[in-house]
Structure formats: structure tokens, C-alpha cells
Image (cartoon, helix red, strand yellow):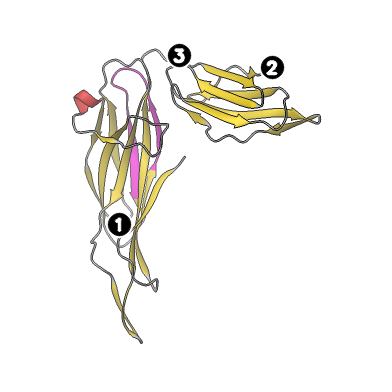
Amino acid sequence: MIYQWIFLISLWCLSFATFADIGVSPIIVDLIGKDADTEIAVKNFDTKNNAYVEVTPYRLVHPANHAAPKKRVRDPEKEGLLVFPAKLVLLPGQTQFVRIIKTAKSLTKDQVYEVDFIPKVATRLISQKTPDGLQLGIRIIVGYGARITLRPDNPSPSLSVKRVNNQLIIKNTGNTLLTITSCTQQISQKKMEIPLEAYTLFAGQMTKKTLTRLTQVTLEASFMGKSLNTFYTD
């Protein structure tokens, strides 16, 4: 999942457009251990204009539900994450770094955050003279959201994989985020990949799939880039 949005601030006709052009890396970060920290690079790809970027952290209370509201982090000590600076002024072509620090004292399961990087530009309509007179264009802002996962002090990755009739049920039964790297089924002596709705499973999250064949399913998963045991259904 890539956290990226395009906001159309003003739109009348599509004759021309201007862009706020930044890049953010990395956009997926794991922090584990006391006072763990990292840096996220923000680059201004515009070679002529400054970029003004606001940096805002949010807590994802229900990270598996993309439609769920997110809670803005206002007190780093109480809410587990410190992000600074809150604003950047990037010269043309310049790269600056935003520091991410885990302030949570003790965690029994993952806490998931999103840090938004949104360029700020004038919201007035953009005008341009043409042979037909004055026309209005659009201003496009591309923003990024980095996912920050604070891992528990004692991670316990665990996965349940079972088949009930023709339903494949996969549940993260541990206390930390897991990634499904492969899910296959033997069909006519060939190993076929089973497409899933979710490949990233947060603690407690479940995903289901209706199977077209009642043959054994083989699933591979990883925890923080390290492979777990292979899982099988009956």
C-alpha cells in the first residue's frame, strides 16, 4: 500500500497545470526497542522554486480499516511518537530530513501511525492568457503518507491458516504486523497463486478467500522481512 493523494485545489478547465513536486523516502518504517528512532528524507524536485511542506503525525486506531478516522498526535509523550520538525522549507533541489522518535515506554502490541507530508501552495486560481482570452487552470498537490509501526517490546508473530469448506481463513493471532508473501494452491498438478484482499495483516486482523478447489493451501509469511514457518491447510 502506497500512501499518496492528489488534491485538486482549483479546477475550471484543463488547459494547463502547476505541480508541487516532492519525494519522501522511506514510506514504511518499523521501530522496535526503547527510544528507537529513524529519519525520513524529503526532497524538493523542483529546480526553480522553494517547497513548503507541513509534516503531521496521526495515530491509526483501526489500521486495518482504511475508512476509519485517524487521530492527530498532539502530545508525543502521551501518544507514543515524536516527529520534528513540523514544517520544512526546501530550496530548489534540496533534501532535508524529518526525525521520527518512539516515545512509548512499553507496548504489548503494535501501534500504527501515519505521518503526512503535504506541500503548501497558494490556493488562488491560476490564470493564463490565451488567444481566446483569460483561462483558469488547476494547481495539483501531491502529498505522501509514511506508515510508522511501533513494534511491541516482546514481538510474538503468530498466524492461523485454516479452510472451512471452501472458505480460506487467515488470521494474525499474534501481537505484531505480518506480511503474507505467497499463498498458493495445488490445482491440476500445478501450483497456482491465490490472490488475497489483504497481504499486510495487523494484529488481530482476518482476511478470507473463497476457494474454487478444495485442495491444500500453502502460505508463506514474514515478520519484519524475516520468513516465518510455512503454513498449510488440510
Q: Nearer the viewer, residue 208 or 30?
A: 208
- On screen, residue 94 above or below 229: below
Asked whether the viewer can see residue 117, the reply is: yes
Magenta residue span:
25-43
- Tell me residue 12's x, y (percent): 34, 71
Say which residue appears at 37% left-offset and 18% top-offset.
109
Asked whether the viewer can see residue 226, the reply is: no
Q: Nearer the viewer, residue 189 or 94?
A: 189
Residue type at numbered disc 2: Asp
Exactly how many numbered labels are in the figure? 3
The residue sitting at the right extreme is 189
Please name which of the two marks, 1 or 3, marks the residue nearer to the observer: 3
* Residue 42 falls within the magenta-colored stretch: yes
* Residue 27 falls within the magenta-colored stretch: yes
Which image quadrant: the C terminus? top right
Please name which of the two marks, 3 or 2, marks the residue nearer to the observer: 2
Question: Disc 3 to disc 2, how far (Cα)?
Answer: 25 Å
Residue type at numbered disc 1: Pro
Residue 74 is tagged as none
What is the chief secondary structure element of the magenta stretch?
Answer: strand
- Tell me residue 30's x, y (percent): 39, 27
In the rendered view, does 213 fall on the left or right side of 54? right
Residue type at numbered disc 3: Ser
**Pointer 1 residue:** 92
